Amino acid sequence: MKIKITRRALLAGTAATAGVTAFAGPWKHNRVWAQRTDKPILIGLTHDASGQFANSGQDEQRGTIMAIEEINAKGGVLGRKLSYIVADTETTPSTATRIAERMINRNEVAFIVGAIQSGVANAIGQVAQKYGVVYFNTNSSSPTEAGKDCQRVKFVWDGTGANFANAAAANAVKTFGKKWLLLTNDYVWGHNTSKATRTTAVQYGADVFDEILVPVGTRDFSPILLKIQQAKPDVVAAAVGGDDFKVMRQQTVDMKLDRKPAWLNNQQDWPDVYGLGIDSVFGVFGTTWYHKLDLPGVEDLVKKYQARWPDTRIDVPGNVFYNGYMAMHELAKAIERAGSTNNLKVIRALEGHKMSARDRLQHGDAYIDPVSHHVQQTIYMAMGNDKPVDKTDYFKILSWVGADDAKDKNEATDCKLQPLDKTPSYEM
């Protein structure tokens, strides 16, 4: 079952939702409905369909929907099928707040899954914590999501900027040089990722001599690239994402700056590069997954993706799809372990949960950190592939580091989870 929330319907329903909230009284924070085995478990999917991360949002949505379909084909969860509603968060935190409120108060979702932009994820997480709704932030990766903006109900599934910096910085200083320039998208993910990169790079001997801010929506990078050309850094450490990253890549290649200086692109999301051609992939970058990993189950997932989504322009699954797909399957497993959709029981089933490398389709085991609710996992470093085996083989995997080696040690002090007994009980 699928319901789509349009922007018009969302805005039209805001007053009604507010009225329900006002009438609801104290029980809105402690909502428990009797479980019926014939009532589907409703999942709210908060995926961008417009804005800077529209391509990634729709790829993430393909992952969560495909997982839901597979779960239902095996009988659902606790004898109940999963259904879902989808809403476009528009890469805008204020829209995400309204959507989360509506999904909970009007649509009565059991869980919320999705987000690309970290401001959007933070907004959804705040609403989810207010009501006690378990929320899976599948793809936004500011270090603050598992740090100061962590929530008891929120679980973070992507690697963060700090994880990718930890995996890359030491080798980059040694290989490329100590004179570093930061290139930073001017919003929460960019700032916090560059902050983590600076800290790690300096620790290994880098001299970060400048930082250039890139306004969201930049389409002419020539002034920025000319400034980089004149500064002659050894390394440009870029934290630029979405459509901005696509445009930057193309113009960097056009100006022949893709080989020198060295580029360290914190994370490369597959939807941001696929379709641009292998020549557009320059520099060293991080990812959580690649469709050519030589591991059991990877080829099967690629085939299932292609059979289910034959008409999408992205011919093979990438890291964004992967995060949504894996997170949705793990949510279903957690409900089964809890024996209930009750949020407090599901949270207990998730905290500290271990996932095998085989199940994760990665090289190392993963686990959900009980301190930060962040999935600690294998982080891969890659570069453009000079010997592709087919037209989809953009990346050459250079190395990988395990969960604990990539871990952001600051999460343990920056994240202050609310006590479980102070988190509202919620069950649908």
Image (cartoon, grey):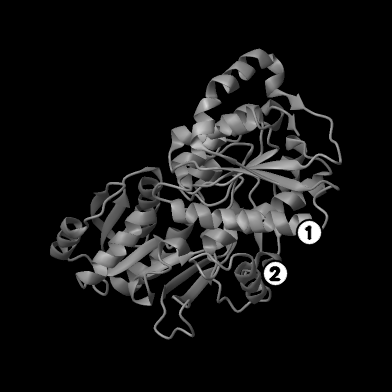
Spatial distance from mark 1 to mark 2, Cα to Cα? Answer: 22 Å
Q: In this rendering, is residue 249 above or below 353?
A: below
Mark linked to residue 73: 1
Residue 330 placement: quadrant: bottom right
Pointer 1: residues within 10 angstroms few (<14), some, or many (20+)? Answer: few
Q: For the point 66% across and 39% down, which residue is it? A: 134
- Disc 2 is placed on an element classified as helix
In x, y percent, where is residue 369? 63, 49
Say which label, 1 or 2, has the lower sequence index: 1
- Amino acid under label 1? Ala
Question: Does any portion of residue 267 appear in the rendered image?
Answer: yes
Q: Quadrant of the C terminus?
A: top right
Question: Does any portion of residue 257 appear in the rendered image?
Answer: no
Q: For the point 53% across and 45% down, which residue is it? A: 146
Q: In this rendering, is residue 69 above or below 171?
A: above
99 and 426: which is toward the camera: 99
Q: Horizontally, is 370 left or right of 141 in the view?
A: right
Pointer 2: residues within 10 angstroms few (<14), some, or many (20+)? Answer: some
309 and 134: which is toward the camera: 309
Mark linked to residue 231: none
Q: In this rendering, is residue 140 above or below 284?
A: above
Residue farthest left in this picture:
230
The residue wearing badge 2 is: 358
